[in-house]
Image (spheres, rainbow, N blue to C red):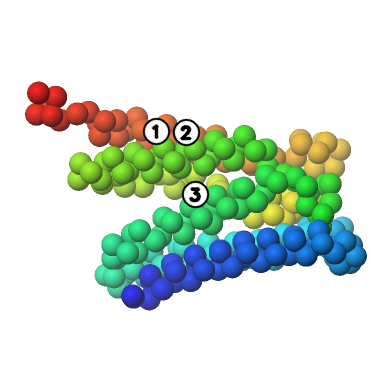
Amino acid sequence: MNIPTKITVSRIIAIIAMLLGLAIFEIVCLANPIFCSSIPTYIGKTGINPVYLVVCIIFILAAITDMIDGKLARKWNQVTDLGKFLDPVADKLLVNSMLIFLCIYDRCYVGGDQYVIPVYLVIVMIARDIVVDCLRFVAAKKNVVIAANIFGKAKTVCQMITIPLILLNGWPFTYFDIGWGKYLRIVSFLAYLTTVVSLVSGIIYVIQNRKVFKEDGKKRK
């Protein structure tokens, strides 16, 4: 296993460890309300929950390793089939697990002012990934490679920006949200924008590669 692949594996391990840690932490909080009440809901007047801040830091570090492993693999000519398999697995695990985490409302250690991404936005973004992955699977069976395009990259950039901002409860843009209402916030606008970009990129992928659904002439006979 080369160094880029080891970095990818370490990202997967870090994500799984973070999710397990969050699950254990929440169980402890539910079992021991006194312990839960000792945790500050927000850090000062920032509106940032300390638990979400830790998650945000881990997410950003994992996102950085996502950029590093691919560049190293290409630079050192160490692109492997295992790396090609693990890299998208790590990406989907990182992004989709965070989207699901951020659409859960009732957490005993978070205040009511924490922004929660609407569940239907999460459904759209995860469904888009499933469709594109299935498209790539069908294309691969026909020896067709569907490379990432500018629209897919735009979707990734939007998610990598929006998810940390949601984890930080919209900070630092919260200072411009005063008087707008709970859902009329900049972070809410970014969540909807990210969903639209994700959906549009998925539609473009399908349209541009619709030829992979055409049956071979010999098979039709």
Question: Quick one: 148 or 34, which is closer to the camera?
Answer: 34
Which image quarter is the N terminus in?
bottom left
Q: CA distance from mark 1 to mark 3?
A: 15 Å
Look at label 3 and name its amino acid.
Thr
Residue 70 falls left or right of residue 119: left
Residue visible at 36% across and 33% down in the picture: 206
Q: Earlier in the sequence, mark 2 or mark 3?
A: 3
Q: Earlier in the sequence, mark 1 or mark 3?
A: 3
Q: Position of residue 65 (x, y in %)?
A: 49, 67
Q: Is residue 74 visible?
A: no
The residue that disc 3 covers is: 156
The residue that disc 2 covers is: 200
Q: Residues within 10 Å of mark 1 (few under 14, many from 20)?
A: some
Q: CA distance from mark 2 to mark 3?
A: 13 Å
Q: Position of residue 103 (x, y in %)?
A: 67, 44
Q: Is residue 157 above or below residue 63?
A: above
Residue visible at 19% across and 29% down in the picture: 215
Residue 106 falls left or right of residue 17: right
Residue visible at 30% across and 34% down in the picture: 209
Q: CA distance from mark 2 to mark 1?
A: 6 Å
Q: Secondary structure at mark 2?
A: helix
Whether tag 2 and tag 1 are in contact, CB under 8 A, the answer is yes
The residue that disc 1 covers is: 204
Look at label 1 and name its amino acid.
Ile
Q: Is residue 7 visible?
A: yes
Q: Is residue 74 above or below residue 148?
A: below
- The image quarter in which residue 87 lies: bottom left
Task: Using the image, tell me which numbered label, if any, was put on residue 31.
Answer: none
Which image quarter is the C terminus in?
top left
Look at label 2 and name its amino acid.
Val
Q: Secondary structure at mark 3?
A: helix
Q: Residues within 10 Å of mark 3 (few under 14, many from 20)?
A: some
